Each structure stands twice: as structure tokens, then as C-alpha cells.
Amino acid sequence: ERQRIRDSRMPAITIAEAEATLKYAEAQLEETTYQLDRGEASKADVARDQLAVIRARGQLDTARAAQEESLLITEIDVAYAERRLLEAQQELQLTQRFAAKGYTTSDKLRMLVVEEKLARKELDLYRVRLAAQKKSGGVSQDAVDKDLDAGLTGQDESSQTVVPVTAAD
């Protein structure tokens, strides 16, 4: 469901484009209103330009909403990726305990190590994507840096799982 939502909502116009369109429409309306006062434009011309301003405001609102939705979806992706990483770490730790007692194979252990690394990379990807979206959306650089630092260095190297593999495996 999340992937379907992500794929279906590509904004037709960016916020910067919508803001520029609105400024242009407002300038056109101002010019047409001035021309109306001088008798060089009709009320229909003014109404046309008022409609253009209303449409431009609607586009800007839509672009802002699309950006907010994209940000929220990416935040959800980060949360799911964090959960998948935690689950992979827990399963790996449990399997390591079983392996120490001889209840599981080294192949299973290796597979879980790969799954844990994959979950970590996926989480890093979503955190970088979220930081990029925040940066492009007007969030302060300090907040972006703080998110990246917290996300990419959320665990130090000593807390990563190490799986010993013996020659007998």
C-alpha cells in the first residue's frame, strides 16, 4: 500500500514553480487593474487575471500538500526500516545463542548477518532520503544535519553484531 501511494503522487509542479506562477499572476492582475483604471482593459480582463491568481494559489497549496505528504510517507518508511532492522538484529542475536549451543547451522547465521546488513542499509537510505526532502522543503540545515547524524551514527561500531565463523563450518 505504501509503495502504491509513493508511486502515484508525483507532483505536477514544485513549490518554487507554484510560488513563481503566483507572483506572475499577481503581477499580471496588478497590471490589468492599472490598465482598467486608465480605460485600457475591461472588467473581463481583470476577472481573467483574478482567476489566474486563484488557480496559482490552488497550485501552490497542492504543491505544499504533496511535499508534506511525501515527507510523511518517508518518515513512515524510516520507522518501518527501523523496525525491520531491530527485528533482524533480534533474530540474529537469538540465532547466535542457538549456534553457540549447536542448535543451528552456520549458513542460517550467515543469512541472518546479510539480512541485518541489508536492513541497516535500507534504513540509511531512507534516512538520507528524508534528510534530502527536509533540506529541499525548507527545513533548516541544522535540523537536517542533526537527523543525519542521529540516523547514520545511531549505533557505534562496537554495537554491531559480530558473527564468528569457524573452519568447521
Image (spheres, rainbow, N blue to C red):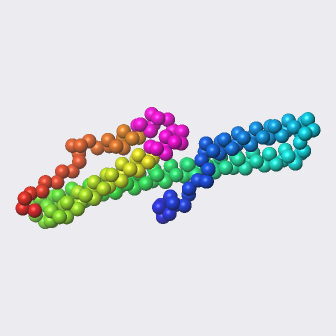
Q: Is residue 110 left or right of residue 67?
A: left
Q: Residue at x 90, y 44 (%)?
A: 42
In the picture as drawn, the residue positioned furthest to the top comes out as: 142
| Pick the front one: 84 or 124 | 124
| Pick the front one: 30 or 127 | 30
Magenta span includes 140: yes
Q: Main secondary structure of the magenta part?
A: helix
Query: Residue 111, percent across and down?
Result: 23, 62
User: How many numbered badges does the structure rendering display?
Assistant: 0
Q: Is residue 136 left or right of residue 28?
A: left
Query: Residue 74, percent across and down?
Result: 46, 52
In the picture as drawn, the residue positioned furthest to the left comes out as: 168
Q: Is residue 8 left or right of residue 106?
A: right
Q: In terms of image quadrants, where is residue 105?
A: bottom left
Q: Residue at x 50, y 51 (%)?
A: 72
| Pick the front one: 19 or 161 | 19
In the picture as drawn, the residue positioned furthest to the front comes out as: 40
Looking at the rendering, the stretch of residues picked out in magenta corresponds to 131-146
Q: Residue at x 15, y 62 (%)?
A: 106
